[in-house]
């Protein structure tokens, strides 16, 4: 598939998503949010491409990356097209390579391969386990005070701009989700200075969407929490929707990286290998 074809695929998916939201249907949006959680090492556009072409995908990597992991893509399998960055080697005074263009590339899901079993993928299935403590450490490490309070009324948590209050006695999964929600407010709407540019309803849905994406990435059961995400289209504009999705993706990615920093399992390895297997470097 050529780069132009991939770009048309993303554009078509976006238009279909907008049409579905206008018709009051949120299934596609929920599917793309879940893909953000599964493929958080990828860009928003590539996460959408993966979900669009292979909705059942769970762990993807490039052809040679799977070989390095001891697995082989089956000859009959069709690759999942994505956009891979072409990097120019950094100058002596720069620490990072520079993205100069993008090219079409392909990845394959683990179900399209045979070979050596990978290390067990990290899953928590209803209990955030160590991720909850890592999340708390990340919050305080960002200079945000964290305290428990019985004076929150009906709210489970509250973002105060530099301080997060949370109701005591919540179960681990619920506490994890509430903390991610309130941290998202701190990152997007307080520090990011977007509070005056979006409605309160959209801000709440963005924070809840980040909690959904991060919970998905950590293996938590989110139940029917995604039912209100259609409200991201509150203003009825495609650009507003895409801006929200970019904020959600960027924020969730940063939090996921922080709460999974100590993992060295197969999922993380495959994600790193996937990037290595689909990135070209220009001299």
Image: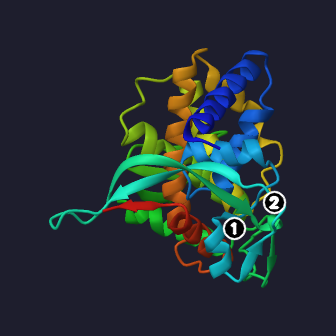
Image quadrant where one finds the N terminus: top right
Q: Is residue 170 visible?
A: no
Report if the CB atoms under discs 1 and 2 are less than 8 Å apart: no
Would residue 77 appear left or right of 150 to someone viewing this image? right
Q: Give whichever of 20, 133 is nearer the camera.
A: 20
Would residue 97 appear left or right of 35 to someone viewing this image? left
Residue farthest along the left direction in this orientation: 93
Residue tagged 2: 77
Q: Quadrant of residue 208?
A: top right
Q: Residue 87, percent across and down? A: 37, 57
Say whether disc 1 or disc 2 marks the residue closer to the N-terminus: 2
Residue tagged 1: 128
Q: Residues within 10 Å of mark 2 (few under 14, many from 20)?
A: few
Image quadrant where one finds the C terminus: bottom left
Between marks 1 and 2, how big is the CA–CA gap? 35 Å
Q: Is residue 39 visible?
A: yes
Q: Give whichever of 219, 103 is nearer the camera.
A: 103
Would residue 15 appear left or right of 184 to someone viewing this image? right
Viewer-side label of 1, 2: 2
Kindly state the secondary structure of the residue where label 1 is placed.
loop
């Amino acid at each position: 598939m050529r780069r132009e074809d991939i770009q048309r695929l993303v554009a078509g998916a976006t238009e279909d998503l907008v049409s579905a939201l206008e018709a009051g249907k949120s299934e596609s949006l929920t599917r793309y949010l879940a893909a953000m959680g599964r493929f958080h090492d990828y860009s928003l556009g590539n996460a959408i491409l993966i979900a669009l072409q292979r909705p059942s995908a769970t762990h993807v990597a490039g052809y040679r990356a799977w070989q390095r992991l001891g697995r082989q893509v089956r000859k009959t399998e069709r690759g999942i097209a994505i956009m891979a960055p072409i990097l120019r080697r950094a100058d002596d005074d720069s620490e990072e390579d520079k993205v100069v263009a993008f090219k079409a590339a392909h990845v394959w899901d683990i179900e399209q391969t045979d070979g050596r079993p990978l290390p067990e993928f990290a899953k928590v299935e209803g209990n955030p386990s160590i991720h909850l403590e890592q999340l708390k450490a990340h919050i305080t490490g960002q200079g945000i005070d964290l305290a428990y309070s019985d004076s929150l009324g009906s709210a489970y948590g509250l973002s105060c701009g530099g301080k997060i209050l949370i109701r005591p006695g919540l179960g681990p999964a619920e506490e994890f989700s509430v903390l991610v929600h309130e941290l998202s407010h701190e990152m997007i709407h307080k520090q990011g200075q977007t509070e005056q540019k979006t409605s309160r309803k959209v801000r709440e849905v963005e924070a809840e969407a980040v909690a959904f994406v991060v919970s998905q990435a950590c293996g938590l059961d989110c139940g029917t929490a995604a039912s209100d995400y259609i409200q991201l289209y509150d203003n009825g504009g495609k650009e507003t929707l895409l801006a929200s999705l970019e904020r959600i993706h960027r924020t969730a990615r940063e939090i996921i990286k922080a709460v999974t920093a100590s993992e060295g399992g197969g999922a993380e390895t495959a994600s790193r290998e996937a990037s290595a297997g689909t990135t070209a470097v220009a001299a």
